[in-house]
Amino acid sequence: MTEKLRTRAEIPAEHKWRLEEIFPDDQAWETLFADTRRLMDDVSLYEGKLADGADVLLKCLAWAEILDGNLEELYTYARMRRDEDNRVGLYQAMTDRAGSLGVDLGSCMAFFVPELMAMPEERLDELRRDDRLRLYDHYFDNILRRKEHILSLPEEKLLAEASELSEGPETIFAMANNADLKFGEIIDDQGHSVEVTKGNYTRFMERPDRRVRRDAYNMLYDTYQKQINSWAAMLTASVKSDCFFARARQYPSALAASLDSDNVPETVYDALIETVHEFLPQLHRYLDLRKRVLKLDKLSFYDLYVPIVPEQEARISYQEAVDIVREALQPLGVGYLDVLDMAFSRQWIDIYENEGKTSGAYSWGTFKSHPYVLLNHQDTLDSLFTLAHELGHALHSYYSDKTQPHIYAGYKIFVAEVASTLNESLLIRHLIQKSSDPAAKAYLLNHYLDQFRGTVFRQTMFAEFERDIHGAVEKKEALTHEGLSARYAELNTRYYGPGVEVDDKIRFEWVRIPHFYNAFYVYKYATGFSAATALAQQILEEGQPAVDRYLKFLSGGGSDYPINLLRGAGVDMERPEPVRQALSLFAAMLEELEQLTMDN
């Protein structure tokens, strides 16, 4: 028999999200799209007139907020509909139209910041003293701190229009990777012919049968390798785009430009890589333990995800995952759990994989709607953690949207991964605490160490790769698929050490990492994990005072710079301690796992 993916129509309605709460139907989307186009024509009421008085400036800000909110509704709905099945042309077109509208809106609004910058400082100070504009103090401060990177009005309009072109590589990658790419079938450990998909690949990597793992691994990378020149061209175009926009705004590098949006110093990025390098021997020690327990002479990359206690097969249905997550997050209080219950009972979550559906998982939504969560649930422990992770994002959005005005509701990615990873930290501690069976506890420790490896060590390796390839372009060096693959292989050798065989397949892994098309994003997983580890410990040790600080952090949105928000919650990311604490926890849990496996 052959196991085939279900179509979207075959998924029961109760297992799908209800996007009708954003727009009741596609016609309502079209109506708002047309209204937004017309509203943009009001630009003549404000362009060139911001210095006329506080009334004009206030009305302009309100007008811009309406336009921004409309675009958020339009693009989010279209893209999430497309993500349900990337093959549907209607939603491909609506997503493209919403993206183009965003470019036009950016061009329409391009006058605002340059005009604000050109205003005499004393005049702007006078306008800001109006009590009605006090709400915008942080907004104005954030603009003014980047004054040297703001261009003239014609230049800003040109960059706004060029931004649509810069999205090309990511869009092409998404279409090729999600809609067009098909993998073959392998024979699973039950003798069934099963199609390999991006959704079930992780499940194959956890199978005890090494032959199944190897076959899935080879199938995946052999398929990607067939279009290696195309993947390299896509990523190169994306990197060059990043570097172009950084140069245009007079930043010394694409990295500096990216970090400046969060007001994060480059030392945070570099120190993360340096600190992780110091702890690589701990990762090598863990991999050596894995090799001994699995009784292998040499580890291959398809051996890195199979549970270190193979006989402990954790098959967790979605409903079981819901119950476990709710129980694990009880330390966050009744209010937090009430919001969780709404997510579970009111179809905020799109649960199962179907043909054409975007792979992976995310949380998204709009200021006016509640948050949504996209999953591809596979009844595994990993899917349990994914549920907890994405709900962390969702509740962060919920608290921010309910507490902050629209202008500050959106939080920076630098803090986003704290909320998601803290949920995972509480979940693993809950599972370990409840486990009385040494073998089951070893299984959980192994899973957490693998999560740690993927979130801190692996994402930091990705961050180093991104820094290297952008640096190469900035030095006018060519990026070829041979060069990309060679550098990626070097990093794998350094991070995974002599105990893991760096084969001819893993050197191509870079081709399938979607985050590389959103440059300098992945380091935030590692910093977020570190901050979350410290905050989770504070919540478990201190109780309500730490919970109160944490919920205030979740409610902060973008009302302050990310590092300041985290400092208020109880961690200072400008110091190395949070990263060191997280890495020390890895070492402590590794020691516990070593004792359990030696005892058994």
Image: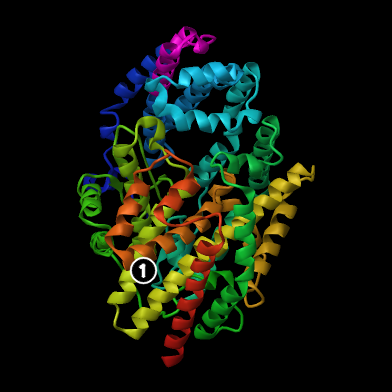
Q: Position of residue 32 (x, y in %)?
A: 34, 20
Q: Residue furthest bottom?
A: 599
Predominant SS along the magenta part: helix
Does the magenta-highlighted stretch encompass residue 290?
no
Q: Position of residue 53 (x, y in %)?
A: 46, 11
Query: Which of the 4 image quarters holds residue 148?
Result: top right
Q: Residue at point 56% right, 18% down?
A: 122
**Amino acid type of the residue tagged 1 in the rendering:** Ile
Does the magenta-highlighted stretch encompass residue 47?
yes
Q: Position of residue 594 (x, y in %)?
A: 48, 85
Q: Residue at point 31% right, 75% down?
A: 433
Disc 1 crowd rating (10 Å Cα; few below 14, some 14-19, many 20+) is some
The residue nearer to you, when weighing 244 against 180, is 244
**Residue 371 against residue 38 in the figure, above or below:** below
**Residue 5 against residue 43 in the figure, above or below:** below
**Residue 494 against residue 129 in the figure, above or below:** below
Query: Which of the 4 image quarters holds residue 410?
Result: top left
Residue 172 in the figure: left or right of residue 470: left
Element type at mark 1: helix
Q: Residue at point 39% right, 19% down?
A: 62
**Span shown in magenta:** 41-68
